[in-house]
């Protein structure tokens, strides 16, 4: 009986350890971070300046001090600071009465310590049940680097029609 109890405890500890290693792995942390940023970018209607600031804070913290944005079809390559990216997102969001952003199919490759390449589908739905409704899915690629134990966006490659122009 004592031996079965020891085996059960060892199996339980191994299971918990395996779950923790998976849950807190860089891949899973990146996936959760991107998903929470997508939620922060969403908008359910009018927002106070405080609500907007609170939603944009994790987005700003995720963007590296110099983030390169590429739009290959337009031959656009620009280094942007987080303030400019946030300003763009605020303007983009202000044009929408309601906005939902979801990130699906996240594929994370970690080629070396402290760097990650991410490919994902960004699903943007805005203004449902209104005349300016749109529903789009775009393939995007991100390069992330780990700085002070946190992942930051250093490069984003977007298709020409993804969040680059207004609706």
Image (cartoon, rainbow, N blue to C red):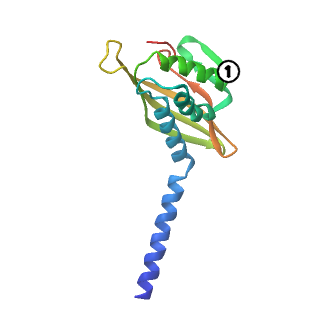
- Give residue 40's position: percent from left, percent from top: 49, 33
The foreground one among 93 and 166 is 93
What is the quadrant of the C terminus in the image? top left
Count of numbered labels shown in the rendering: 1
The foreground one among 93 and 52 is 52
The image quarter in which residue 84 lies:
top right
- Give residue 61's position: percent from left, percent from top: 63, 35
Please name the residue that numbered disc 1 is placed on.
79
The image quarter in which residue 100 lies:
top left
Judge left or right: residue 33 versus residue 101: right
Residue 116 vs 69, above or below: the answer is below
The image quarter in which residue 146 lies:
top right
Instruction: Name the residue at 63% across, 36% down.
Output: 152
Judge left or right: residue 111 versus residue 1: right
Instruction: Name the residue at 45% across, 72% down.
Output: 11
Residue 142 vs 112, above or below: the answer is above
Numbered disc 1: secondary structure? strand
What is the quadrant of the N terminus in the image? bottom left
Q: Residue furthest left?
A: 129
Residue 150 vs 7, above or below: the answer is above
- Give residue 111's position: percent from left, percent from top: 61, 41
Residue 163 visible in image: no
- Give residue 134's position: percent from left, percent from top: 36, 18
Instruction: Name the residue at 50% across, 41% down.
Output: 31
Judge left or right: residue 132 versus residue 52: left
The foreground one among 48 and 4 is 48
Residue 136 vs 13, above or below: the answer is above
Residue 106 visible in image: yes
Disc 1 packing (10 Å; few <14; some 14–19; many ≥20): some
């Amino acid at each position: 009986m004592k031996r079965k109890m020891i085996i059960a405890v060892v199996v339980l500890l191994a299971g918990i350890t395996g779950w923790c290693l998976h849950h807190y792995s860089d891949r899973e942390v990146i996936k959760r971070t991107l998903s929470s940023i997508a939620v922060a970018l969403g908008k359910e209607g009018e927002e106070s300046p405080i609500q907007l600031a609170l939603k944009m804070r994790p987005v700003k913290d995720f963007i590296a001090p110099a983030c390169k944005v590429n739009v290959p079809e337009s031959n656009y390559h620009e280094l942007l600071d987080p303030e400019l990216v946030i300003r763009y997102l605020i303007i983009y969001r202000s044009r929408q009465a309601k906005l939902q952003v979801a990130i699906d199919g996240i594929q994370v490759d970690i080629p070396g310590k402290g760097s990650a390449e991410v490919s994902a589908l960004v699903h943007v739905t805005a203004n449902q049940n209104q005349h300016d409704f749109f529903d789009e899915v775009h393939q995007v690629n991100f390069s992330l680097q780990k700085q002070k134990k946190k992942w930051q966006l250093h490069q984003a490659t977007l298709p020409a029609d993804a969040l680059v122009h207004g609706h």
